[in-house]
Image (spheres, rainbow, N blue to C red):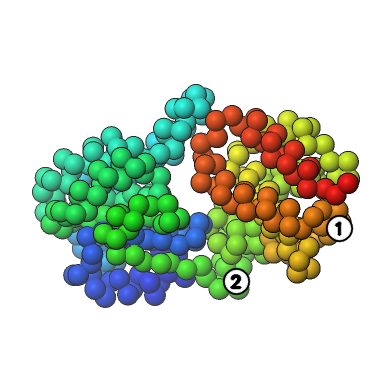
Amino acid sequence: MNYYSWHKDAYQQLAQRSGKLPHALLIKGVTGIGKRAFAGALAQGLLCEKPVAPLMACGVCDACHWFGTVSHPDFRAVQPEAAESTEDDAEATDKKKKRDISVAQIRSLEDFIHISAHRGGAKVVVIQPAEAMNINAANALLKSLEEPPPATYFLLVCDRPHLLPATIRSRCQQLLLNSPAMQEAVDWLVKNGASRPELALAQTGGAPVLAAEIDTEEYWTSRKQFFDGLSLRAFEPLALAEKFAAHPVPQLINWLQRWTYDLASLCFQQRLRYNPDFKEALTLSARNVNGLEVLRFHRELVRFQRIVNHPLNVRLLIEDLMLRYAGLARD
Ligand SMILES: [Zn+2]
């Protein structure tokens, strides 16, 4: 596993103090810039038995081979169960559980943490996204962070550190990873065959890994349908809600959040940030709404991000959002 080129300096700074790494590292930064790859490279670098340089895995030793097949006995990766399972037919309450990292998942690490390493070297636990730990899971982890076993490293990967309990944050050394400069991100996307690099980056606030993920025909088509629906002069909130009833809610909220950001931005500053390809529709809509109301709605959507993974009734939620959006229009 390798880190992305724009994180080379950050990685090398860590490598320079490879003998004195903290037992708990909180790797933070915005979504979609490559934090997981960074944590993966670091985990492999810690486990590799013939590193080519400090923390630089060789890629060919037994340890690297096991790491590559996710079977290294001294490595554990903890993530929400929903990310591990491909089943999508569970009931809503089960889904909620599966989107959390549970206390059972953290407790299941206890044996691993307290026996000595199979290979006599380091043991590594990667937890991602760390903010998915529910409060009981975080408390269970806290004990291990307070009394760290020797040569055991906890790598917590986190998009939104403010959602982590302060007690966890304070026991980790924090490492902030950055996005690359815009041109570097565009070049990287072009090299990787992106169809609309600039627009994809505008969507993700400059995060290239996420931009590469979303840059699919399916994404651009659904987004266009959704925004076309919002822009209609005779906007039909319930029809649009119906059409997108089966669409992933986090993505809808994200689109709506950024659409309203651009709308408010046009109302107050005559510019837009996320959706330059919809400038005309947004400009028309901006004439027809109350900027302050849009701003208020936008801020609510931002707060929504906290609960967006656990909506109780998806259909009602989408309908409600569409009706609220319709309510922004001036009579
Ligand atoms: Zn190796």
Q: Residue at x 55, y 30 (%)?
A: 312
Q: Residue at x 65, y 30 (%)?
A: 315
The answer to whether 260 is drawn above or below residue 267 in the figure is: above
The answer to whether 103 is drawn above or below residue 64 in the figure is: above
Q: Which mark is residue 182?
A: 2
Measured as percent of width and height from the top left, residue 215 is found at 63, 53
- Counting residues from the N terminus, which is met first, the one under dot 2 or under dot 1? 2
Quick check: 27 left or right of 17?
right
Q: Residues within 10 Å of mark 2 (few under 14, many from 20)?
A: some
- The residue that label 1 is drawn on is 287
Q: Nearer the viewer, residue 102 or 4?
A: 102
Quick check: 97 left or right of 64?
right
**Which amino acid type corresponds to the residue marked 2 in the rendered image?**
Met
Asked whether residue 66 is in view, the answer is: no
Name the front one of labels 2 and 1.
1
Gap in angstroms between the C-alphas marked 2 and 1: 31 Å
Q: Residue at x 17, y 46 (%)?
A: 113
On the rendered image, what quadrant is the N terminus found in?
bottom left
